[in-house]
Image (tube, helix red, strand yellow):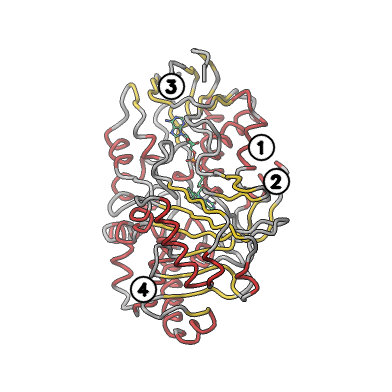
Amino acid sequence: MAHPTNLEADVIVVGAGLSGMIAARTLLEAGLVPLVLEADERVGGRILTEDVLPGVSVDLGAQWIGDTHERMFRLAAELGVQTFPQYDEGETSYDLDGSGVLRENAFHARFADELAELERVLRRLDELAADVPVDAPWLAPRAAEWDVISAGTWYDAQGLSPIARTLLEICTVGILAVPTVEVSFLHLLFTIQTCGVTSELFAESEGGAQTTRFVGGTAEIPRRLAALMADHIVLEAPVLLIEHTADSVSVHCRGGLVARGRRVIVAISPTLAGRIMYDPPLSGIRDQLTQRLPNGSAMKAFFVYDEPFWRADGFNGQLISDVGPARMSNDSCSPGDDHGVILLFLEGDQARTFGRLPIDERRTALTAELVRHFGDKAATPEFYIDGEWSDRQWTRGCYNANHGPHVWTTYGHALAEPIGVIHWASTDTATYWSAYMEGAVEAGERAAHAVIAELTK
Ligand SMILES: Cc1cc2nc3c(=O)[nH]c(=O)nc-3n(C[C@H](O)[C@H](O)[C@H](O)COP(=O)(O)OP(=O)(O)OC[C@H]3O[C@@H](n4cnc5c(N)ncnc54)[C@H](O)[C@@H]3O)c2cc1C
């Protein structure tokens, strides 16, 4: 795409994900002129809806919001995007620690003690997480102790039965997209605290993070946001270099575009922010931080059938398993469409291993898993699609930045703290539902308000 070579605005925003666009919208509302530079040929970043068949779209990126995602509900209403509840009727199918495939009621009856153990650990996690300040986790009274062990180490020390321990691993990898051995225990507690309690994070119904979806797919949100400020967004403009002085920035993109402004908000994940050059260079602490915040690994794989046959068999479309490549699945049908859509998650090591296989092999392995849980009808999908996020140059993994042991307490303060005229957004810097769309909105608003305060005083 041919760009003009020089542009000017009050505030340059790097990244037209949700966070960057919300920052830009907030600036516009305050009378400032933003300019959003987006590397990709589309807006939305980690939000990506694909139309796969007539009337069928799937969310390869973010899909759900939960009851406490107030900013997202408000945003959807403002933009006229309708929501609908996640289908949640029927039983989940389990296969854990050699149990064989069991329907939910049978699984719960057989492993009632193990599930009670799991519940006790979740309550304990909630109690500990309550001591973590979300805007400064390193100040938690026991931060030093919690940040030198992994979540996996803490789990292993709880004396859990294999089933309870496996379920805990699956739940945790399901939100952090890395094996628990790679996650600081303090980061796990921070994540719980930014979302409320474990039941909010892990549950799919009543108050969980996955209760509600968007009609037409989640990408309706960034598309409509972008349409409201089309004059302020430049696509295919990857930012390579940010020159900064005490009161100005020059932001250089591939292809020669230079955007000048008074402030810049960098609304991309920390690891990608660390790949931009800064002149003068940023502090060693900031760079060491971005060297230590890798994104997780997750893939979503969608099977489209002519009907949601599992519903008639009394299933809700969910599986929880430690046998095949996918640990979890969901019913992902859309209202007003007769197709059956089922989504399988590959997270952490599963995404890393199976993500390397040719797509046909992934499809075959996942089909076998669906057949084991939901029967032969699962063997003949009409369509298959999956999405590998670490291959995407402008995302490089998901769902968000992972804090391994010793990162929060050593470098955490450099995560969201502005450096001169450079401000940081993206969900990875949020203090409420960090890692989620709700966090992306919160972080975009926070960075924009900080800039507005500086430029309008
Ligand atoms: C598979 C998957 C499933 C998810 N499921 C959910 C869910 O169900 N619910 C939920 O709430 N959240 C979910 N999330 C997380 C959610 O998508 C993110 O929290 C949110 O979209 C992040 O928005 P952001 O603006 O902070 O970052 P991003 O979306 O990453 O936006 C950053 C933008 O910056 C651009 N960019 C990167 N580098 C540069 C550069 N150098 N120059 C210019 N532009 C650049 C990128 O192209 C991108 O558009 C999911 C994410 C994924 C990937």
Q: Position of residue 331 (x, y in %)?
A: 59, 63
Q: What element carries label 4?
A: helix
Q: What element carries label 3?
A: strand
Q: Is mark 1 on a helix, strand or loop?
A: helix
Look at the picture and state if 311 lies above or below 109. Answer: above
Q: What residue type is labelled 2?
A: Val
Question: Which circle marks residue 141 in the picture?
Answer: none
Query: Is residue 204 found left or right of 338 in the rendered image?
Result: left
Q: Which of marks 3 and 4 is nearer the N terminus?
A: 4
Q: What residue type is labelled 1?
A: Arg
For the residues bearing labels 3 and 1, Cβ distance under 8 angstroms:
no
| Residue 22 in view, yes or no | yes
Q: Earlier in the sequence, mark 2 or mark 1?
A: 2
Q: Which amino acid does label 4 sit on?
A: Arg
Tag 4 residue: 165
Look at the picture and state if 108 lies above or below 263. Answer: below
Q: How far apart are marks 2 and 1 (CA)?
A: 9 Å
Q: Residues within 10 Å of mark 4 (few under 14, many from 20)?
A: many
Q: Residues within 10 Å of mark 2 (few under 14, many from 20)?
A: some
Front-lying residue, 244 or 352: 352
Q: Distance between the residues labelled 4 and 1?
A: 43 Å
Tag 3 residue: 253
- Asked whether mark 3 lies closer than 8 Å to ligand 1, one says yes
Look at the picture and state if 385 lies above or below 380. Answer: above
| Residue 432 in view, yes or no | no
For the C terminus, the quadrant is top right
Q: Earlier in the sequence, mark 4 or mark 1?
A: 4
Q: Distance between the residues labelled 3 and 1?
A: 25 Å
For the residues bearing labels 3 and 2, Cβ distance under 8 angstroms:
no
